[in-house]
Every structure is written in C-alpha cells, then in structure tokens.
Image: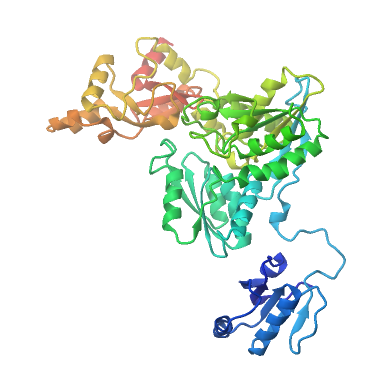
Amino acid sequence: MPPPRVDVLLVVGPGPAPHILTARAHRVVPIPSGTTSPSLIAELRVSIPRLVGVTGEAAASRAIAEQVHQAGLPTVLFSDSAVEPIAGVEVCPIADSGPPMDVVDSVIDLIGHTPMVRLDHIGRDLPCHLLAKLEYFNPGGSVKDRPAREMLKAAESEGLLGRGSTIVEPTSGNTGVALAMVAAQRGYHCIFTMPDKIAEEKRQLLRAYGAKVVICPTAVPPEHPDSYYSVADQITASTPGAFQPNQYHNPGNPRSHEIETGPEIWRQTAGRITHFVAGVGTGGTISGVGRYLKSQNPAIEVIAADPEGSIYSGGGGRPYLVEGIGEDFWPTTYDPSVVDRVVPVSDEESFRTARRVTREEGILVGGSTGTAMWAALEIGRDLGPEDVVVVLIPDSGRGYLSKLYDDDWMTDHGFLRARGETVEAVLASKGDRLPPLVHVHPDETVRTAIAILEEYGISQVPVVKAEPPLALAEVVGSVTDRLLLGRTLHHPEVFDQLVESVMDAPLATIGQGETIDQVADRLAGSPAVLVLDGGHPVGIVTRSDVLSFLERS
C-alpha cells in the first residue's frame, strides 16, 4: 500500500526525499542540519497538522521523529531501514512491498528513450538509409522535455528554485510546455513570453498547464523592449523569486542531448550513423547530439537545417513563418564547430515537405520537421547505400493544425493554388508598368509618401520595415491618398511628420493561388489587397486591376 498522506514532510539531511513522499505531502520542509529548532516546532503547532512525516538519513531522521512526537505532534517515520522503535510513532516503509509493477514514479521519468523509424516512402528515391528519431514520444510532446528537465534539475541543485518559485522563459511553445510539465510536478509557477506568430494551439496548451502567457510582436529585434526576450527579462526582474532558465545560454540545454539523445541515437543505429540532420533554434539539440556523435566517430557529418532569413544560414534574422527554429541572434548554446554544413530552407519547402511526411509516412509532423526533412532529402541524393541519415523530428504536427494543415491558411499565404484563374494571373496582367511592390518606410515623411503615390499614379502603398524580398511580418501598415488627405487637410505640419505616426493598419492579404471570386470578395471591404507568394508579399491588386483583367479575359 502507498505511504499515508502527511500535512508536513520533514526531510532530514542533504539528499532529496523520494518522489512518492513529496508528492503526497502538502508541505515539504528540509532540515539539512539534522536537528529541529524551537521555532519550527512552534510553527508546526500553530498550523495544527494532522500528521507530520519524517524521512532521511536513518539515525538523524529517527531522532527528529522522536523530538516532534515529544512536542505533542502526531508523527510518522518513513524508512526502509531497520530502526529502533519509538513509542507512539509508526514506522512506515517507503518502498512498495507488493510484487513489482511496470510503472514510473512520475511523468518526468518518461522523458527520453524515444523510438526511431525508417522513412522508406518519402526516402524511396534515396540510395541511403533514411531514419527519423521521433522526439514527440516524449511526455510533453517534444524534444524540449530533455533540456527542460536538465535545466531545472541544475537550478534546484544550485538553490535557484524552490517550492513556489516562478519560472519565466521566452519560448516559441515547446520549451514552455516542457518547463510547465516539469513545473507542475515540482510545484512551480510559470510565465512565458511568446512571439505573436505562434499558433493559438500552443498558447492554449501552455495555459492548460496553468501557465501565464504574454504575447509579444515578432517583427522587432531582440534588443527591442517589446521583444519576447526583453519582456521575459523585465518580468524576471520584477517578480520576486523568479528564475529564468534561459534556454539560449543555459549549458544544461546542450548537455541534456550530449548525455541522453546522442547516446540513444548511437545505440539505436549500432554506431552506423553517418549523417545527423536537425533544425536549429537555440542550437542545443544539434550541438549536444553532434558533440557526442563526433566523440564516437569524427567522420559523422552534422547538418543544420535553417529557415531562409535566419542567421545560421547567413541571413539577418528576418521573419519567417516556420516556428521553433532559426534565430536573429547567436545563442551561446549553439556550437558552430560541431556543424559541418548549414542548409537554408524556405517556408514553402518546409511546409510542403511536412505535409508529405504526414501523408506518405503517416507521421504527423510540424513545419520545422519539414525543414529538416527537406535538407535530409537534399543531402541524401549524393550518398551511398552504406550511409545512414538520421533526421530528428522535434515535435508533432498537432500544434500546427490551424496553419500548415489548414488548406485555407496555406492558400491565403500563397503556398497552395486553386484551379482556374487566380490572383497570380491578375498580378501578371498588370505587366511591368509598375515595380512589383511599390512601398514606403515608416521612417520616411508623409511628403515622401505623397510623392511616391504621385510618381506611380497609385492610391495606396504598404508601409514596410525592410526592402524586398519581404516577410509578411515586416509589413507594418499602409497609407492611402484618402488617409493622407484627411490627415493633412488644414494641418500642413503633417507633411513633415513620419509615416509611422499617420499610417493605417496593413492591407488585407490574399494568396496568389486564390481564385478571382475570392479576391473579389476580399476587395468588397478593402480598396486593395496585398498578394502573398509563399508567405512573402509580392504585389498589390486593386479593384480596378480585377476589372481590367476581367475585361481582357
């Protein structure tokens, strides 16, 4: 039978108490010195506990149990060792005395030892072995369970976390879920900051664990006060007892993969692995796994799959739609010396490949898996029959059902194309009389915006933070001739104000693969729409553009 539930558990000595005892205790009090104090006894009497449990080093815990009992408090001593009886104190065993059951003490003990599967359908044209390490079999649903456990374990041993502490972390979702899962077991509170591009399912999942979620804008640099990194720092500084694991700089992140994930892959492939492919976010996974694998065989190649625009593949960190990988700064958890090659992958290639994996292999995966799989298929073409390529699948596609598995969302962003006449045809019919995407910047003046409208004979332009090719997140607003007329009429000083001070909301968007009927519906409530191709703005279509196209058709 399980040990009885206690109101207070006194843990004597430096070691941790067994989980089965702490989980069943309302309050846990460590007593590192091995002796009680009058203040502790007084505090226990005030709370009027129904039962006080004592556990720890055998002789010291027996002495403490005797002291607590003599103070008039109902006491039970938990020990599997032979101890001298104490009159009036029950001694209960900790270990289950019945036949052993195939069960772990907590969900945290299920982390790791994930399976590996062959991908012979999507890899049918490759001469090499193509294998996938299925990290979504971790109890939190992703590879991030491993570093979450390791980082919090280290923080506890360093005294940075205690029961009732608050964990604060900037996260794109999976790390937050992993931290929230471990925190629920350990009795911690959680606050997570998250960029606004992250799917709603991930936000709801974090809230389901009892965490607070703070949403921040994507299209700002890391040092900006509104970035999800900066906001996390602000919350940590202003919250008493807060601890930020900081997965981007915490050595426990790559260490968890060097001591667990890497050895698992080596054993599962019988040491035959020749290539390891993974997406790169914090860099912890690829650095830790790569470091271990190269310690076993320096000839193993480590390939990083990276979203186009991310710094790892030479970009400036410009926004992309794939979630959970890529960065706009260099985390210290990333070890570039371990990586032999970085393969840039577009959003479109990532999403299409993820959908292929799901439909051809029956494995529901997310966009970052699509990124890694596309890179694996690229490098696999040049390999031989003895080569073994392992792709790490970090999570399931269940968190992306409203995005890459939603045909409407994919079409809206220009990743899918309808049959028949499409917006792409309307855009092409405009010819080259105008640049593909006339635009203004938020730091230009209203006078400059008016000059651009006059120069090209147009009535509206998007306001963007960079030069094409653009990411959708870099479109921050719009200006129209009607808007500017209203702002400047009787207010000549507005001509020299910045566009960002007068701009309107961004134009409505439509995928270039959507139908003429769909763009007509979208234009019913807007004078123009911004056309997307693979998530990138490529042009503007107005009502007159559609009318001209229909007239010529």
Q: Nearest the camera: 35 or 248?
A: 35
The residue located at (72%, 17%) in the rendering is 382
The residue located at (81%, 33%) in the rendering is 271
Q: Quadrant of the N terminus?
A: bottom right
The residue located at (74%, 43%) in the rendering is 114
Q: Image height check: is 402 above or below 149?
A: above
Q: Position of residue 233 (x, y in %)?
A: 44, 49
Outermost residue, right side: 99
Outermost residue, left side: 490
Residue 228 in view of the camera:
yes
Q: Nearest the camera: 245 or 498?
A: 245
Q: Quadrant of the C terminus?
A: top left
Say whether residue 228 is left or right of residue 86.
left
Q: Image height check: is 46 above or below 99?
A: below
Q: Position of residue 453 (x, y in %)?
A: 26, 20
Q: Position of residue 354 (x, y in %)?
A: 64, 31
Residue 372 lies in what quarter of the image?
top right
Question: Across the whole image, how many numbered discs are drawn on residues?
Answer: 0
Say whether residue 244 is left or right of residue 445.
right
Report the colour scheme: rainbow
Say whether residue 520 is left or right of residue 6.
left
Q: Position of residue 54 (x, y in %)?
A: 69, 77
The residue located at (64%, 86%) in the rendering is 73
Residue 371 in view of the camera:
no
Residue 303 lies in what quarter of the image?
top right
